[in-house]
Image: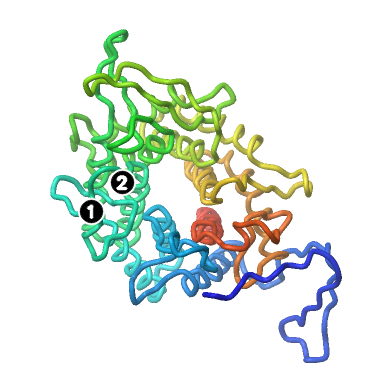
Amino acid sequence: MKKKLAKILTAGVMTFCMVGCSSTTTEVIKAGTILDNPKDNLTSAERNNLRSKVIADQMWKNYYDEELNGAINYYPYKDDTEEIASVWHFTSILSLYIKLVKNNPHDVELKRKLNTVLEGLEYYHERRTDYRAYAVKRGVDIDMASSGYMADVYDDNMWIAREFLNAYETLNDESLLTKCEETIEYCLTGWDSSINSDTGAEWGGIYWGPDYLSKHACSNGPIISTLVRLSKINPDKVVNGRTYLQWAKDVYDFGLKTFKMSNDLYGDMIGTEKSGGVTTSHGSLDTTAYTYNTGTMISGGAYLYEATKDEKYLNQAKKSMKASFEYFGDDEVLNGYYQFPLGTTIWFNLTLFQGYYDLLLVDDSASEYLALIQKSIDFAYNNYLYDNYLPVNWVSGWQYGLTSDENKDVMDVCASAEIYALLSMKDSLNK
């Protein structure tokens, strides 16, 4: 794990010995040559699956400590204060391995790793008796994470609930469904039910966390699709006064009203003011657009459309998909090959692509966007794969001096592998 990331040369001539060649036969490839997918006799689904496993296997070797059943945030090490993965980072590993097992249901080793990660997640489970909640920081033992002031945030718990449901559907383990529902119930306690005296209606929206006054797109959007999916399993179950489907509609409506901008993307957050524990006003919207905020609302809209057949959800999801690709996708460096934002973890971009996939389940229009994502990540894999990792910049490649390339974030690595796993799932839909 102490090995330094080597510099990637961007000029000159590179020499490769091709698979199956003799020790004296080489193919000279000049820098700047664009490599395409190999003629490996694999289907697209098979190749995507293989590539997701290549990256995931390397991640496991460098980031995951099975003896401690935990993970590190960065490789090579960044500094001692940032080594142990936060629950958000850890959940990205869980999300990846669920998709890997879904794509490889008979792979015993992948299933073993998934169960290992599921157990490792419980080190973040808080010491409390009222709700199932997961803290930002890992505890010293299972079920021993500290609770209390600012120990957790609702959005982390929404991602976890989503993955419990995904794991339940993949492993058919009822205990995972129970954990999903219990975690969702905790997230819904963050809903602002105080009444706006001007309108007579709830202010609504879920706060970022129990100790925060801000409401974020990321603490509302991620729960919607999970609520809709739970409504199919338990359509009549009432949680905090509402069915799962009603909650999904209410959270979606709040997100649409509060965060959607005129360009059909979603802003980031609003502040609130309170008096005596009751909300008195909302602040103005922070209009910073992140890929994952739009992605979760696309997912939520797609699932709500599937459940209700109300065209308003489908139409908005399609408008946001088109707007998001035009806004976030950048092919100025190389026409037809798209780079997505680098300012944050590329796991944000994965969440946008997940939105496209979820929309594809109900509408074919998403296929053209996913095809361009496929083409772009393949460009990175064919031309820049190094030590079984991809650079965060798919088009320009490795950047010496770029922090995210020198000290790779586990979320970026997992996102690269999971994008391929997601694309493999997409290909399998056509079988």
Q: Which residue is mark 1?
A: 126
In which quarter of the view is residue 122 placed?
bottom left
Q: Please give left or right for residue 291 compared with residue 107 in the image.
A: right
Where is 249 relative to 278, above or below?
Answer: below
Residue type at mark 2? Asp
Q: Residues within 10 Å of mark 1 (few under 14, many from 20)?
A: many
**Which residue corresponds to the image point at 54% horizontal and 56% vertical from the top-left?**
419
Q: Residues within 10 Å of mark 2 (few under 14, many from 20)?
A: many
Q: Which of the pair 111/40 is nearer the observer?
A: 111
Q: In the rendered structure, are the residues bearing label 1 and label 2 in contact, judged by CB atoms less than 8 Å apart? A: yes
In which quarter of the view is residue 322 placed?
top right
Helix, strand, or loop for circle 2? loop
Residue type at mark 1? Glu
Q: Please give left or right for residue 142 compared with residue 413 in the image.
A: left
Where is 359 relative to 121, above or below?
Answer: above
Disc number for residue 11: none
Disc number for residue 152: 2
**Which residue corresponds to the image point at 28% horizontal and 30% vertical from the top-left?**
191
